[in-house]
Image (cartoon, rainbow, N blue to C red):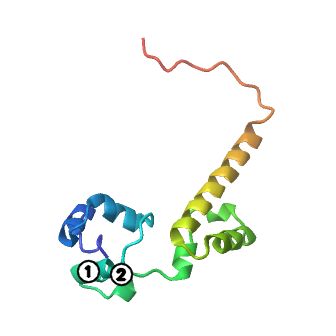
Amino acid sequence: MREVQRLSQDQLAQRLGISRASMVNIEAGRQRAPLHLLWQIAEVLHSKLIDMIPTPEDVAVRPNQGLLDREVIDQIEGVADGDPATIKFLTGFITKTVRADHTSSETEGKPHGKAKSRRKS
């Protein structure tokens, strides 16, 4: 909603009387906004609060989840107890781990050549 109205995080934060860092963290799901602040955000953005709240399905869909099967995703959601920030954190952590394991298994057994120097003469 903020982006549609071409407001920066800083501009919205100023209108709400909060720090830009808080606005960044609220949008990223790292900080929970109190209900009164959510109402203020909706008011400033001339929208309904209900339109700004993601559905559980919206929260559960993460980029790169294709690396994780449904069983793992269900376990993450169960452990996170529905908390979007925890779901995001765990999904990201496990995805990075899966990628790292996949990358290391691809390079196993390949000879390592001499590293080229990146220094310019």
Q: Which residue is mark 1?
A: 40
Q: Nearer the viewer, residue 31 or 60?
A: 31
The answer to which of marks 2 and 1 sits earlier in the sequence is: 2
Q: Nearer the viewer, residue 114 or 79?
A: 79
Q: Which residue is mark 2?
A: 35
Q: Residue at x 29, y 72 (%)?
A: 2
Q: CA distance from mark 2 to mark 1?
A: 9 Å
Mark 2 nearby-residue class (10 Å; few <14, some 14–19, many ≥20): few
Question: Can you give x and y, in whole percent of width and height, for residue 45 in the image?
Answer: 25, 79
Question: Can you give x and y, in whole percent of width and height, for residue 63 in the image?
Answer: 56, 63
**Quadrant, the N terminus:** bottom left
Q: Residue at x 36, y 81 (%)?
A: 35
Q: Residue at x 32, y 88 (%)?
A: 48
Determine which quarter of the picture holds residue 94.
Answer: bottom right
SS state under label 1: helix
Q: Judge whether 84 appears above or below 25 on screen.
A: below
Question: Can you give x and y, in whole percent of width and height, for residue 67 in the image?
Answer: 68, 60
